[in-house]
Image (cartoon, rainbow, N blue to C red):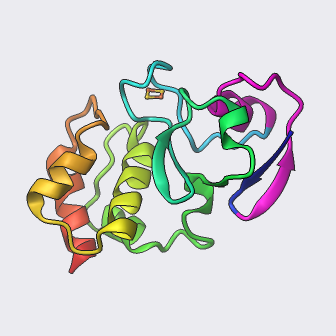
Amino acid sequence: MELTINGKVHKVDVDDDTPLLWALRDELKMTGTKFGCGAGLCGACTIHINGNPARACLTPIAAAKGAKITTIEGLSDTGDHPLQQAWVKHNVPQCGYCQSGQLMSAAALLANNPTPSEKEIDSAMSGNLCRCGTYPRIKAAIQDAVQ
Ligand code: FES
């Protein structure tokens, strides 16, 4: 099967019902997308499918066929997406494990709503868990990137 990821076509030879997360990490070695719970509960595996946030652990690759998939590796060519800059400025990560998923959720939010309210930020980010409790810095970074 062919998948379009970060603007490039990749061939993967796995069953149609294989979760996209497995194809990304194990077949294509794109390990920026993280495996947290594997059950759609934590948000660590958040990617974009046609610009919308999606859980790669719950997305069978058959459902991603023909779609435009973006992973953290493709959020910006040079790592200077406004959110990535704000993440660095606010020193957001602690252990870092959940942060690519956090960034992808935040990036989808700003792409679809460039000036979100605090409530909209909370709502958009509510599905992304952080064991280190970096939530205040995440919110501050998003608000900074909005300005
Ligand atoms: Fe997909 Fe937790 S690994 S939501």
The quarter of the displayed image where residue 130 is located:
top left
Q: Nearer the viewer, residue 98 or 59?
A: 59
Q: Position of residue 106 (x, y in %)?
A: 34, 57
What is the quadrant of the N terminus in the image?
A: top right
- Which residue is painted at 59% across and 73% down in the image? 78
- Which residue is painted at 14% across and 50% down in the image? 136
Q: Position of residue 39 (x, y in %)?
A: 46, 18
Q: Is residue 140 above or below residue 125?
A: below
What is the quadrant of the C terminus in the image?
A: bottom left
Magenta residues (range): 7-27
Q: Is residue 20 above or below residue 99?
A: above
- Which residue is painted at 62% across and 32% down in the image? 21
Q: Nearer the viewer, residue 6 or 73?
A: 6
Q: Is residue 78 above or below residue 126?
A: below
- Which residue is painted at 40% across and 61% down in the image? 107
Q: Nearer the viewer, residue 29 or 3?
A: 3
Q: Nearer the viewer, residue 80 or 146?
A: 146
The answer to whether 44 appears left or right of 58 in the picture is left
Q: Position of residue 66 (x, y in %)?
A: 74, 51
